[in-house]
Image (cartoon, rainbow, N blue to C red):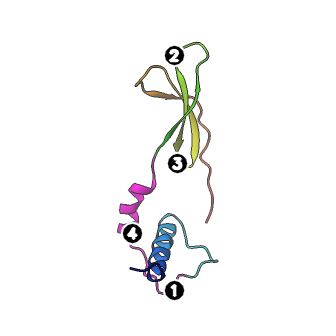
């Protein structure tokens, strides 16, 4: 397959990912693109929501560390008290909301 023919496929894929998570913006034209079924949105949604933890800092005295973890659209601060230990949430910042 040459790149010239693959651009519409890539564009359709990108547009379908956008429409799974939100409404298609008015600035985009989606002519000829089929509607995405609720079943496909639900199936794909499992792969679009994830958690990730990032190292923040070591405790200055103890063998502990701080990490940030994304819950929904908000980063929260957690402490981990031992290697391989569970994290304990320290901040409870409200989730950031946008309207589409």
For disc 2, the neighbor class at 10 Å (few under 14, some 14 to 19, many from 20) is: few
Residues at circles 1 and 2 in contact by the CB criterion of under 8 Å: no
Residue positioned 43% across, 22% down in the render: 83
Residue found at the far bottom of this picture: 32
Query: Quick one: label 3 or label 1, which is nearer the N terminus?
Result: 1
Q: Which residue is mark 1?
A: 31
Q: Position of residue 6 (x, y in %)?
A: 44, 78
Give the mark toward the camera: 3 or 1: 1
Query: Quick one: label 2 or label 4, which is nearer the N terminus?
Result: 4
Residues at circles 2 and 4 in contact by the CB criterion of under 8 Å: no
Query: Quick one: label 3 or label 4, which is nearer the N terminus?
Result: 4
Residues at circles 3 and 1 in contact by the CB criterion of under 8 Å: no
Residue found at the far top of this picture: 61
Q: Which residue is mark 4?
A: 38
**Label 2, label 3: how far apart the Cα atoms are:** 29 Å
Labelled disc at residue 63: 2
Query: Quick one: label 4 or label 1, which is nearer the N terminus?
Result: 1
Residue positioned 52% across, 68% down in the render: 18
Labelled disc at residue 72: 3
**Label 1, label 2: how far apart the Cα atoms are:** 57 Å
Q: Position of residue 84 (x, y in %)?
A: 40, 25
Please tell me whether mark 1 sits on a helix, a strand or a loop: loop
């Amino acid at each position: 397959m040459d790149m010239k023919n693959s651009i519409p496929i890539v564009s359709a894929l990108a547009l379908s990912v956008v429409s799974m998570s939100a409404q298609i913006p008015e600035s985009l034209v989606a002519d000829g693109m089929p509607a995405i079924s609720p079943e496909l949105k639900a199936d794909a949604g499992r792969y679009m929501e994830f958690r990730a933890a990032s190292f923040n800092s070591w405790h200055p005295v103890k063998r502990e560390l701080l990490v940030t973890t994304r819950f929904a659209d908000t980063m929260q601060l957690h402490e981990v008290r031992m290697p391989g230990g569970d994290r304990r949430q320290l901040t409870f910042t409200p989730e950031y909301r946008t309207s589409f």
